[in-house]
Amino acid sequence: MAEAKRAYFYGTGRRKTAVARVRLYPNGNGTIMVNGRNVDQYLGREVLVMLARSPLRLLEHGDQFDVSARVIGGGVSGQAGAIRHGIARALVRADEENKPVMRRAGFLTRDSRMKERKKYGLKRARKAPQYTKR
């Protein structure tokens, strides 16, 4: 462990417009709390819960850390991605040897895809009104 004196390791994760501030507490039992609620209850869908847990599952640290996350902005899917990004960054901060594994899995790369803005004269970003010949 790089910083054994610290009570927790932190990481900031981002996805779309969601931002997650994640704290990893060592010697835990694997509980993940998001905005004061259990991750299963907060995210709702099992796919999103698996997405958020994936960095811990990759390193097989699922029951060694307790995770506390504060998430703002975005929707549920973006928040799950932000939590995953934050957990991965915190795991690297906890042990620098995790970095190559996380990098290969793509967990440390910030997903920069954002919603395209709506343009005037169109219904959405690219959808045009139906063309009428007569």
Image: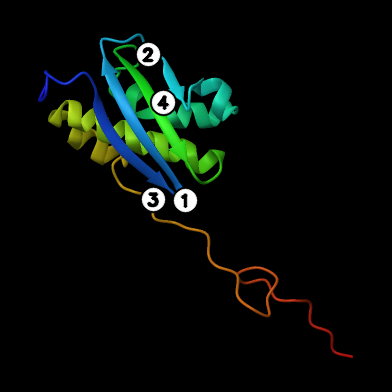
Q: Secondary structure at mark 1?
A: loop
For the N terminus, the quadrant is top left
Mark found first going from the N terminus, 4 or 2: 2
Which residue: 79% across, 82% down? Answer: 131
Q: Looking at the image, is 47 positioned above or below residue 123?
A: above
Q: Residue 71 placed where, x, y %?
A: 45, 36
Q: Amino acid at mark 1?
A: Thr
| Total marks in image | 4
Tell me if label 1 and label 2 are in contact, CB under 8 Å. no
- Disc 3 and disc 4: Cα gap in Å? 17 Å
* Crowding at mark 3 (Cα within 10 Å: few <14, some 14-19, many 20+): some
Q: Earlier in the sequence, mark 3 or mark 4?
A: 4
- Judging by the rendered image, the residue that carries numbered circle 4 is 53
Residue 51 vertical placement versus 123 (above, below): above
Give amino acid for label 3: Asp
Residue underneath mark 2? 30
* Quarter of the image where one finds residue 98: top left
Q: Which label sits on residue 111?
A: 3
Q: Nearer the viewer, residue 27 or 133?
A: 27
Residue 15: image location, x then y, percent:
42, 47
* Residue at the outermost right position: 134
Q: Amino acid at mark 4?
A: Arg
Residue 17's label in the rendered image is 1
Which of pointers 4 and 2 indicates the residue nearer the eye? 2
Mark 1 or 2, nearer chain start? 1
- Side of 74 where 64 appears, left or right: left
